[in-house]
Amino acid sequence: MAMTKQDVLKLAHDQNVQFVNLQFTDIIGTLKAVTIPVWKLEDAIDQNVWFDGSSIEGFTRIHESDMFLKLDLDTFAVIPWTKDSHSGTRARIICDVYMPDGTPFEGDPRGILKRQLERAKAMGYVFNVGPELEFFLFRRDAEGRLAPLPHDEAGYFDQTTDAATEIRQEMTFALQAFGIDVEALHHEVAVGQHEIDFRYCDALAGADASVTLRYALKSVALQHGLHATFMPKPIAGINGSGMHVHQSLFTTDGKNMMFDKDGTYSLSDFAKQFIAGQMHHIKALNAIINPTVNSYKRLVVGYEAPVNVAWGQRNRSVLIRVPRYTPGREKAVRVEIRCPDPAANPYLAFAVLLAAGLDGVEKKMNPPEPVEDDIFEMTPEEVAHRGIGSVAANLAEALEELKNNSVVRGALGEFTFNKFFEAKMQEWDSYRIAVSQWELDRYMEIH
């Protein structure tokens, strides 16, 4: 049931909350907040909270800066590490951004996802996601700078007795305090790399949970003198961090549209069309789901990176994988897209993934035959002969594809596309003209 004003005020009182963080994200996905004392909470619920949007990445211009936050009361949660602290117990509420005339702000990432979910709802569907955000834990050196070495030497699923085991458990308690249903926590493939997975849910709740997870894990790590990073490729030569996204669509009465017991891998034609749509639009999607220069340091062959535009079931070298179906668990049938990374704004990521998939459904696209051979072991000639393409090679290519893609660009809206494109082209240009240490080491002496 939806939370009422009375519910929230009572919870705040019973939990001795003294301050409330009103949270939202900019277009890049950076978490923003304005803090109010708890005695202003009722006014904030009734009258909203005004702020200056001109200083937020991708928001309004300075001459049209007034905006307000509308509180989503269902997202109220006490921030667990602030309970009974000397600075006062704090809670958080995630907000939607509105214009002065009372209309939703077209550049609000949460609002962009809501618009795509409304489109799916009008078609009779609910979009569910189960994102898996990988991250690294690093120490800081004596000067407080991030040290380049991870703090452990464990590998995938290793049962270790180092501090990271307890820290992951503490992170899990924090996520559960936010109402996030954690299903598994484990060490990942690379040294210093970890993953905490939560139960699938509707895409809006999943995006809220993803933003909360990044915030919570960074905060818990900091309390242990560590830094949690969701940077896609923080260390050269080892695996980077991804954000695999499990996806399914249900009818409003609970039928899984992805399931057909007689279909390939128990997938329906609907599911295959959804897959085809995402494969067709993947290079434009890359600009949103792999949004940084560093993202493409992860998307290279040899590091379990899903660079190949193909699909299959047992095959983890493909872009889209179909988890194996267990009889009696029809509702668990889903597809997993493996190239997104945790630097993405989850609201925008889930919005464009849905838009691309639904475009495949509406146009009844057919995917190519599934691939079960290990593409990483194929020669370039074999890959070309099989007609297997690749994701965008870098941020510049992805942005150019986005510019020319009406479906993905349309899901963002022209306002957000222009702001996002401008910000990311500046990032690319800054990277393109920078001189790296690698270049100095390689060329300084010989030229």
Image (cartoon, rainbow, N blue to C red):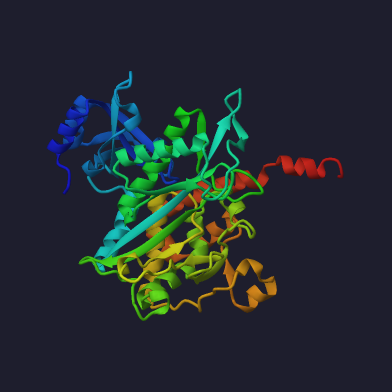
Q: Position of residue 84 (x, y in %)?
A: 29, 23
Q: Give the camera-side residue of 433 and 288.
A: 288
Left or right: 108, with 187 as reference point:
left
Q: How many marks?
A: 0
Q: Is residue 385 above or below residue 216?
A: below
Residue at figure coordinates x 87%, y 44% from the top left: 446
Q: Position of residue 18 (x, y in %)?
A: 25, 24
Q: Residue furthest right?
A: 446
Quadrant where the C terminus sits is top right
Q: Is residue 281 visible?
A: no
Residue at figure coordinates x 58%, y 38% from the top left: 152
Q: Is residue 320 visible?
A: yes
Q: Position of residue 151 (x, y in %)?
A: 58, 36
Left or right: 5, with 318 as reference point:
left
Q: Residue furthest left?
A: 6
Q: Residue furthest top?
A: 86
